[in-house]
Image: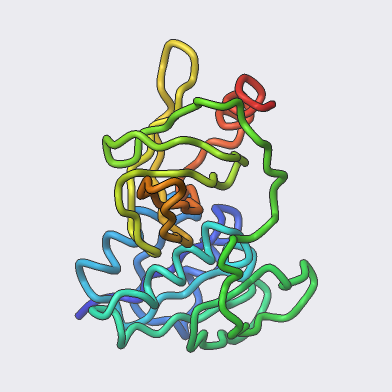
Amino acid sequence: MPSVVLIASPEHLPALRDRGDLGEVTAFTDAEALRALDLITRQRSPVVVLERLFAATSRGAALINRIKADPALAACEIRIIAHDSPSARRSPAPVDTAGVAAGAPAVAVTAPLDQRGTRRAPRFKVAGGVEMQVDGNPATVVDLSIVGAQILSPTILRPNQRIRVTLPNGPRSLRLNGVVAWASFEIPKGTVRYRAGVEFLDADPAALARVIEANKT
């Protein structure tokens, strides 16, 4: 029988994993969210438990919405729990966690995500002509933050699509996994393109900060 998937920060994971009310648990740290999603998808996990602080991040919100967008995971129940709370609350809909305060109790917030993405990290316009690779295809970077990017792509992109991203980073490229948070179709001057917001799932903030510093306008 598929186990409950638990995702939390390393400091909170042991206490949550040992709780008796969650049953058999397969635990992942917040840095292993992509591995957790792979397991959730493969075993069609009936219950996914997210620690509140992780759920309040852009990575947590992207994970929640990715699960909710997958028809094969329609029966998956997502619960948000605080590490110091005795109970978990179910999240029945795509979650916008931007308003979860640090001291607030664990609740399921049911408003959808802002189409243009959350604003938890400063965004920087980048110099014209800076390109990234999305699944091996070129895309122009419009702006960049340590949690995501806005891009222009001649290749079709769809919301909740999982992608592999390569960013220029001096002599070595920075490779990331991501998810398309939103996408829109444009035809400027007869040229077809897609404008999209990408949320990074496994970003190294320090490495991205260096990329931003080297390319911002």
Q: Is residue 151 above or below residue 158?
A: above
Number of marks in the rendered image: 0
Q: Is residue 142 left or right of residue 178?
A: right
Q: Position of residue 21 (x, y in %)?
A: 47, 85
Q: Is residue 27 left or right of residue 145?
A: left
Q: Is residue 117 left or right of residue 24?
A: right
Q: Residue at x 48, y 44 (%)?
A: 151
- From this viewpoint, is residue 35 visible? no
Front residue of 21 and 175: 175
Front residue of 58 and 125: 125
Q: Is residue 147 above or below residue 66?
A: above
Q: Quadrant of the C terminus?
A: top right
Front residue of 146 and 79: 146
Snapshot colouring = rainbow
Q: Position of residue 75 (x, y in %)?
A: 30, 88
Farthest residue toward the front?
A: 189
Q: Residue at x 52, y 57 (%)?
A: 59
Which of the 4 image quadrants contains residue 120?
bottom right
Front residue of 34 and 157: 157
Q: Position of residue 69 (x, y in %)?
A: 36, 75
Q: Residue at x 44, y 29 (%)?
A: 131
- From this viewpoint, is residue 204 visible? yes
Q: Position of residue 209 (x, y in %)?
A: 63, 30
